[in-house]
Amino acid sequence: MMMKLTVFLSLFWALNLLYGEWLAYLVPSQWTCSWPHLQRPSNFSPQIGVDYQSSYVKIAVITDPQLMDKTSLPLAPKSLALEVVQFYADLYMRRAFLSSVLPFNPDVILFLGDYFDGSDRLSDEEWQESLGRFKHIFNLNMIQKTSKPKIYYIPGNHDIGYAASYNLKPEIIKRYESEFGARNFKLTIGEVDFIAIDSQTLDGHPQGNFTLDTWGFIENASKDISSTPRVLLTHIPLYRPDWTPCGPHRYSPVINQRINRVDYHQEIVYQNYITEKSTNSLLDLIRPALVLSGHDHDQCTVSHMYNNGHATEHTVGTVSWQQGNLYPSFMLLSAKNSSVSDGITPEDALLTNLCFLPMQVHIYIWYLSLFAMTLVVILLWPANEVHIVRKLGSLMVAIRDVLKSFSSAVKVKNEDENVEYEEMWDAEGSMHLIKKTKKVQVVNESSSVERSRGKVIMWRLLKKHEKGVAFMERDIYKGKLIIYIREGRLGKELTNRDIAENLRGINKVLRVVPFRLYFYFMFNLRDGTDK
């Protein structure tokens, strides 16, 4: 029985680790999420001869991976604790990208900023190390070799800082642009224009070089007037009249400010949103149909009104499980393809679907619960195996009896069970059956007394071993005395036999631990290293 328990626990842990370390990441691509253009409404009737599955460009949107470094936690650089935190944060995002995002086969991937946590405070060597981790997590070296999907980046405040640090550390801007490209750019995907801006400079000093460059780019982009839908890409969300930040930690009542400036040049050192003035100017010039932003680490949707139009802003949640959001996510965006545009209305030109990733914190909590339950089984099973099996057997018998009571009719008591019939003939020669009570065998009173006396003697003998065998169950069945003797404990003392059984059981059941650890680290090492 103990060997069966060991095998059962091993298989049970293997199944749970298989789900938590692999299958959970397949859930978005296999069951819970899909491209929005494949989820057509019931009233949609496509034209004959048009393949609407190929009439959209497929775009995946990811934001705020914010790779942890020496600036993230009050831990010593290169310490074991920091290395462990970084490893599990990177491991989650790599699994999520390879198993949840890439299976959708996107044509384009958009990153909305905050690739590193403290990029503006890292040396060139430390920054290159973080860049190597970033490329490994999102498999960028392999993607660049195949040239599909195409990848585009916009800067975040954790990548190049806010406007106040631009003039102080211009080398950070050059370092970013040398690897990720221009901070402000425009591209056309399918039949949709995407306008990406460096939102950290919008509210900087009006005469600052970087601020002037960004607003100059926006004005030039606004001159290209066409009916093509536009998407605005910004890391920092736009202003909202009834400001309600997506994440609960984005606004601090202690500071009581959502935009902080330094006293000297009034440059911004922190902001949760773009100011109202800049937001209105941005919307009036760009006239977007859709706005995509990050920065909040949480996900929400807001509508904006501007002159002769309105835009829907989707703030996408972080892709990391260690950035304050228990429900990491990414977005699937379907953009109208220029090659097949007939029959697609302006409202259907841009379709979005938010997809949630596995809840890593819940998976680890489940592991801890399983570990606690395994310990309870290890400690209780060896000394109580017979008792537990007997209780389970009694439970199964009770369940079987209940099922039988529903499947068969209730038996009616037979009054003739305790009677017998005798043939009687009357004077006329007729035969009659006469009921008579069955004769019951009387048990010899002396033998009963002897049995009772035997019980008393046996019980007294058992009482002498108060530290050993102490339990006796007795029953009388068809006049026979049946005695059940089982082992147990009296008070809080254990017999030597109990201790031996516990140690022997623990030794067998603990064989599950090496198997479980091997299975767990096999997944981690496989996903944590390049193939």
Image: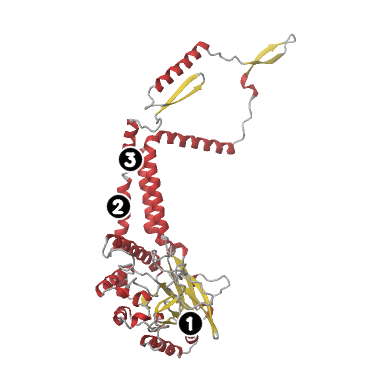
- Identify the element where label 1 is drawn: helix
Disc 1 residue type? Thr
Residue 228 appearing in the image: no
Q: Give me the C-alpha separation between circle 1 and circle 2.
A: 54 Å
Farthest residue in the right direction?
A: 428
Q: Nearer the viewer, mark 3 or mark 2?
A: 3
How far, Cα to Cα, is label 3 from label 2?
19 Å
Asked if disc 3 and disc 2 are in contact, CB closer than 8 Å, the reply is no
Q: Which residue is mark 1?
A: 279
In the rendered structure, which amino acid carries the disc numbered 2?
Tyr
Residue hosting label 2:
518
- Cα distance between the residues tagged 3 and 1: 66 Å
Q: Quadrant of residue 103?
A: bottom left
Q: Residues within 10 Å of mark 2 (few under 14, many from 20)?
A: few
Q: Quadrant of residue 70?
A: bottom left
Badge 1 density bin: few <14, some 14–19, many ≥20, Cα 10 Å: some
Q: Of circles 3 and 1, which is in front? A: 1
What residue sits right under mark 3 in the picture?
Answer: 506
Q: Are marks 3 and 1 in contact (CB under 8 Å)?
A: no
Quadrant in which the N terminus appears: top left
Decide if residue 119 is in sight here: yes
Can you tell which mark lies on residue 41? none
Above or below, comparing residue 103 to residue 409 in the picture: below
x%, y% of residue 410?
62, 33
